[in-house]
Image (cartoon, rainbow, N blue to C red):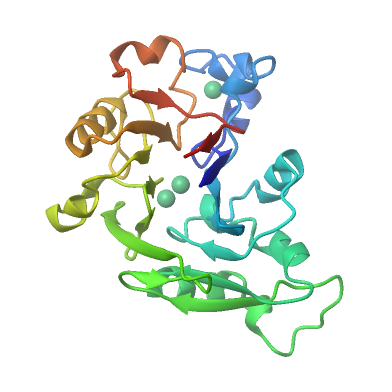
Amino acid sequence: MKITFLGTGTSHGVPSIDCMINHYSDCPKGVCRLAQDNPRHRRTRSSILVELNDYCILIDVSADFRTQVLREHIRRIDAVLITHSHADHIGGIPDIRSFTKDRSLPIYGSNESITSIQKTFSYIFDPLTTIGGGIPKLEPHIIENSFQLPSEIPVNTLKVDHGNLKGCFGYQIGPLAYIPDMKSIDQKNLDKLKGTEILILNCLRNSPAHSTHLTLSESIELAREISPRFCYFIHMCHDIHYETDSRDLESWMDFSYDGLVLNI
Ligand SMILES: [Zn+2]
Ligand SMILES: [Zn+2]
Ligand SMILES: [Zn+2]
């Protein structure tokens, strides 16, 4: 299995437009300014590509999808999994049309996520839309629990709480568990994570606590409870400095970065 981190940032991305407008004067650790010269501080919106047996699974179509595809030379996508319908996770859907010229692409998500995508991008699903420059051909699939992709790869859903948004998922594919946005998880779903080899987990910022996301101490605590072989933190804002904030990490934890590739 090959995992490519396409984006590792929170909804604003790093550097944030807010910090640029304020001439970086409010940036808590100077990360937005450091991002100009150090790519490890640059974070596009969160998404990964999983390649397994020559089958390419995209998890979320981030608002930076186009940039990520061009940067990583992605030439093939076979299926799309959506964690939830917040704009940072679905904003790139119009650009997926380049991958649906010859065939439609299956897109999987909760009832809430698929319904929201159909509403947000209604032109894609309206048979009366004039094709013009091309529209994505998507085949929506509402999923609830475990399911199989057309290539017979089994996928488990992990139901997580992320504020009051309903139908927010993480996904488990073989040894990998991917949870970009969450605040809490119930015991039933936590139990599914036993034996995870690679955990990719939400870690919004160092402090203060947040109502819909895990922050560093909470992410570390949850990672210890799951105890995978390795844990990579994702969906980080400019309050995570990958060097100075790494003090409290275990040897098997690290902050991810855009372009990181794992072969497991
Ligand atoms: Zn998000
Ligand atoms: Zn900043
Ligand atoms: Zn979200």
- Comparing 164 with 9, the one in front is 9
- Comparing 148 with 24, the one in front is 148
State whether residue 145 appears in this view.
yes
Residue at 34% over, 65% down: 167
Vertical comparison of 179 with 38: above or below: below
State whether residue 164 appears in this view.
no
Q: Is residue 253 left or right of residue 92?
A: left
- Comparing 219 with 161, the one in front is 219
Q: Position of residue 178 (x, y in %)?
A: 40, 47
Q: Is residue 181 left or right of residue 12?
A: left
- Comparing 20 with 39, the one in front is 39
Q: Position of residue 15 (x, y in %)?
A: 60, 27
Vertical comparison of 209 with 29: above or below: below
Vertical comparison of 49 with 209: above or below: below
Q: Is residue 119 left or right of residue 169?
A: right
Residue at 43% over, 22% down: 239
Residue at 17% over, 36% down: 225
